[in-house]
Amino acid sequence: MNALLQHPRTRATLVWLGRWRKEVAVTGAMLLTMTGPFLLKPEQSTAPARYDRRLVIITPHHDRIREEFGQAFAAHWKETTGQTLFIDWRVPGGTSEIAMLIKSEAVAAFQQHWQRDLKREWTPAVAQACLNSKASPDDDARKAYLASDVGTGMDVFFGGGAYDFEQQAKAGTLVAGDGQKTGISALMKKHPAWFGENGIPEKLSGEPFRDPQGRWCGACLSSSGIVFNRDVLRRIGIDDDPTAWANLADPRYYGQIALSDPGKSGSVTKALEMLIQQQMQIAVDRLKADPTLKLTPEELEARGVAEGWDAGLRLILRISANARYFTDFSTKIPLEVARGDAAAGMCIDFYGRSAEEGVRKADGTSRVGFVSPLGGTSISVDPIGMLRGAPDPELATAFIEFVLGEPGQKLWSFRAGEPGGPRHHALRRLSVRHDLYTSENISRMSDGGEAPFEKALAFTYHPERSATAFSAIRFLVRVICVDSHDELHTAWKTIIDAGMPERAITVLEDLTRVKYETATGSIAKTLSSRDKVQETRLARELGDAFRTQFIRAGTMARRGL
Amino acid sequence: MSKSLSILIFVVMSAFFACFFAYPIWAALEAAFRGPDHRFTLQYITEVFLNELYREGLWNSFVIAVWSTLGSLAVALPLAVCYVKFAFPGRALLNSLVLMPMILPPFVGAIGVKAMMGQAGALNSLLINLGLMDALHPTDWLGQQRMLGIIVMEVLHLYPIIYLNAAAALSNLDPALEEAAANLGCNAWDRFWRVTLPLIMPGVFAGGTIVFVWSFTEMGVPLLFDYDRVTAVQVFRSINDLSGNPFPYALVTVMLLFSTLFYLTGKVMFGSSSSGGGGRATTSRQTAQLPAWAGWACTAFFAGVTFLAVLPHLGVVLLSFSKDWYGTVIPHSLTLEHYHDALGHELTLSSIANSLKYSALAMLVALILGIGVAYVSVRTKIWGRQILDAMAMLPLAVPGIVMAFGYLAMTREGQPFHWLMLGEDPILLLVIAYAVRRLPYVVRSAAAGFQQVSPTLEEAAQNLGARPEKALWRITLPLVAPNLVAGGLLAFSFAMLEVSDSMILAQQAAHFPITKAIYSLVLALGSGPNLASALGVWAMIFLAVTILGAGVILGKKLGALFRG
């Protein structure tokens, strides 16, 4: 030992270390910091440095879903083919942002194809027509796009709402595949039972569950509801848990509602649509019950829908006026509610259930609760579909098969650790396949008692009533409620403080500018034209008008009118 | 250095700047002025000004910038004066702690602040426990005062920049001037306002402009506070819709216009007011011994400010350990689980590796360019050397988000620089973006080094037969090495913390740098903020080790580097 210490080499090293001791110490400290992530790195990664094949999935699904599905599918693929997969998740934002991104990328890709391969001139008309489902079928650009295989570099669009998938399918960015090997059309041939009435029905209580042509298919179920914090509710003087959407318009909720911008999140738009649908149903039922009205069924429907639209928007306006502010991601809603920053919020069912589970105490009680408003929500699906020009259509198809098959469906719904279930966290979603609700499976599901296929019958979704207005809802809520929130919020406070004077409220809630006919007519037209200048101008004009109106309502309330 | 080499450096630098500074800005601007028929149009820009929301966004950004700058000045100037003029207990330690707030991107700090300032957060709990607040009516600090929250975050994050500048300017100030004023009967207060402050104005201005432009274009903090009526956020919101939508570009153009305008206004108003104060001090400054109580007051002031500034960090640390932080001053149950989850997260290791890779390469590029520019501008007399120097400082005036947008625009498919994307890997782009943005720090520190090292040493070597390049390599560079290391280090740390370029240019999980990984962890369901905090704490430790380590190695002050 001593000899070793005396050795000239050792001494030289020690001298060197002595001279550079500061540097060595600093380098050592840096390396030490680096060890943490290295030691803890996941043993199984879906983003390996070397891989045989890559699957690009664009999704609004949150982290845990991506993790469970990514790892399970990569393991499944390794087992069956021996190939290492790289699952390249793209998460640019919420569903609405993804929809925008896909279309914008598709147009850019088509522009390349049009100019470079077809040697044609790129004009605004071509840009308008290529993804426009309403363009004439003889339009050259539209034909060229539908015939082409220009892609966005992404394989699969996973998650979001049926509405956005329908829009993408119509635009042509989602494809059904060749019916033999790729796409959902091929899966429909391979597993006819999955797509029957006992599996994934085409529709349930009016909600589309899958595209008959196979361009998209529901992958799990979702419904909307209210997540709430009991501590905050009691504090602001509300003794009962909320049960209906209309509860959230109560002025006692002022500044205590968590909402997110429907321009970014598909799930919030869906919840708002449900709210409007419920009001439409109420209006139609009321008109039907009135024997003095002599209306044909068509007239009655039209009037009910228009009245329901007004009532729904008014409710949304009040709820927005109560909102604390609008977050950018819908995942923040349950977080803020759980943290006590808001009394209640609108969110998708599993967010609410996960938040409840997250803060549950040992005795089983939780300060957070979740409720699906009675008759106020349908059961809809979170779909999956293959994108046009998918770089690896075969792999994309295999992933879709995995998600719709038993392994995927069990990941959605089983408790963590159950055989076939998720590894780390229960995802708390409901399986989209009716045939999988067997008593054995139900006992392993986190929310097996939900019986969604039976509950769905309580609410009939009428797509014809709000489908044309869906993009208008998103746009109007953004312009009237989100962009003008400061003015709305302030005016509402003045009105509440003034004891809710009626005239001021009437001014605040004046919705003549956005009647049902206008929303489904000129507004929807501007929105579908993809002309950004027009759209921005419309947003500015409407926004200015509403902001002035809110400020006026506030002034009136202050004067005691 | 031989003249041909100087000219070569000049040409290379100009070409680099043309490609990666001027061109991206042009690329961002161009789309704002090109109508659907490819002709020049002003309608997008006018639409921006007509739109009340955009106008308000600009106004709010401006208000935030003004208050952040004023706030930083109010905090930093007294600190700098105390530090330079007085001796007080713990002076050296407190001075080095001033850099602390800079080791965490402010948006991560905002996570901590959100946890502490919520309705059931630590602050309200503290006030309720103290009996200062009614438990039934807690204040919703964040819901009602988001703008204030943003300003406070910015001030607490950015005041060190002004502090370092002002302290450096003060130490370089010739005390004889103040003494002369005192001899002529000027009292301390007037002396400060009429002699000291005007003389250090260029230094303060340099720091102030950085803070102003930084907070004018800051995106991370308003995003975390969900505050949408700010231009940078409005731009960020629209990046998913680039093709066919000219408004993001128009907004960026307007933003650039304003930041340049503010920069120039500031420069005209304050930048050149230093007349006779330059040059080396003729007498060395003696720090005044204060009476004990005043000394401790200085210490308390310093420590108090630093404590406030690290409060967000403290919140982040607590959050990263807490199971459920709700209605209590400090979390009631602690756990290490978040570290396990965050450091073991799929994004983490790759994002750390990416950040190290991007930042190290960017530092290298910035160093090479910076040495070249500094050498040419300090040591040679070729025509246009001042232009070169000014060019290298320009990135300070241009908002990061504008640059990021420009890079995005110039590498879109079909554009001449599309190959920079290397398929889909943004590494080249990010390295260039980081390097250009951090170049000013490196240039300033290298220039300071070259100014301090006498050229006669190099000339002596040349007399002894060394070629100019060899003389530079063997004599001058080793002598300025500490400056270079310090500059490089700052470039590296800031690149690690870069937000705007990272958010916009890295679009795929596999290429995320650490800041974007933190941002996406925030959104994870359930424990998102805790996970993000845990990763944030890791980043803090890493940067603290890096910066303190460099401080230990160099034993020098890092202050002079921010002198823009």
Image (tube, coloured by chain):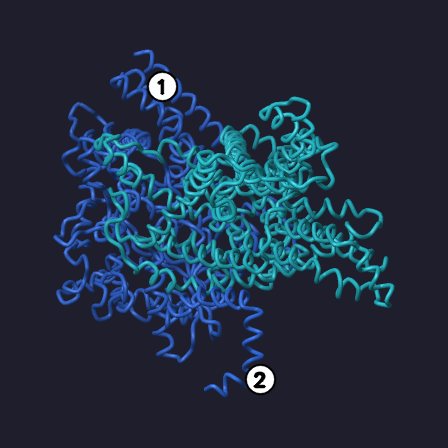
Chain colours: A blue, B cyan
On screen, residue A513 above or below A350: above
In the rendered image, residues at marks 2 and 1 fall on the same chain? yes
> The residue tagged with tag 2: helix, strand or loop?
helix
Residue type for callout 1: Gly
Q: x, y (%) of residue B222?
A: 45, 40
Q: Residue tagged by mark 1?
A: A554
Instruction: Please state the chain letter of the residue tagged with numbered disc 1 in the rendered image.
Output: A
- Can residue A93 be seen here? The reply is yes
Closest to the camera, between mark 2 and mark 1, is 2
Image quadrant containing the C terminus of chain B: top right
Q: Earlier in the sequence, mark 2 or mark 1?
A: 2
**In the figure, residue B429 lies in which quadrant?**
bottom right
Q: Residue tagged by mark 2?
A: A8
Residue type for callout 2: Pro
Residue at 47%, 75% in the rendered image: A52
Mark 1, other Cα within 10 Å: few <14 / some 14–19 / many ≥20: many
Q: x, y (%) of residue A525?
A: 46, 37
Label pair 2/1, CB-CB below 8 angstroms: no
Q: x, y (%) of residue A493?
A: 31, 24
Residue at 27%, 59% in the rendered image: A427
Q: Is residue B164 left or right of residue B532?
A: right
On screen, residue A10 above or below B434: below
Mark 2 to mark 1 CA distance (whole Å) = 87 Å
Q: In this view, does A104 lie to the left or right of A248?
A: right
> The residue tagged with tag 1: helix, strand or loop?
helix
Residue B274: assigned label: none
Instruction: Please state the chain letter of the residue tagged with numbered disc 2 in the rendered image.
Output: A
From this viewpoint, which residue is outermost toward the bottom? Answer: A3
Mark 2, other Cα within 10 Å: few <14 / some 14–19 / many ≥20: few
Towards the viewer: B79 or B101: B79
Q: In this view, does B13 lie to the left or right of B230?
A: right
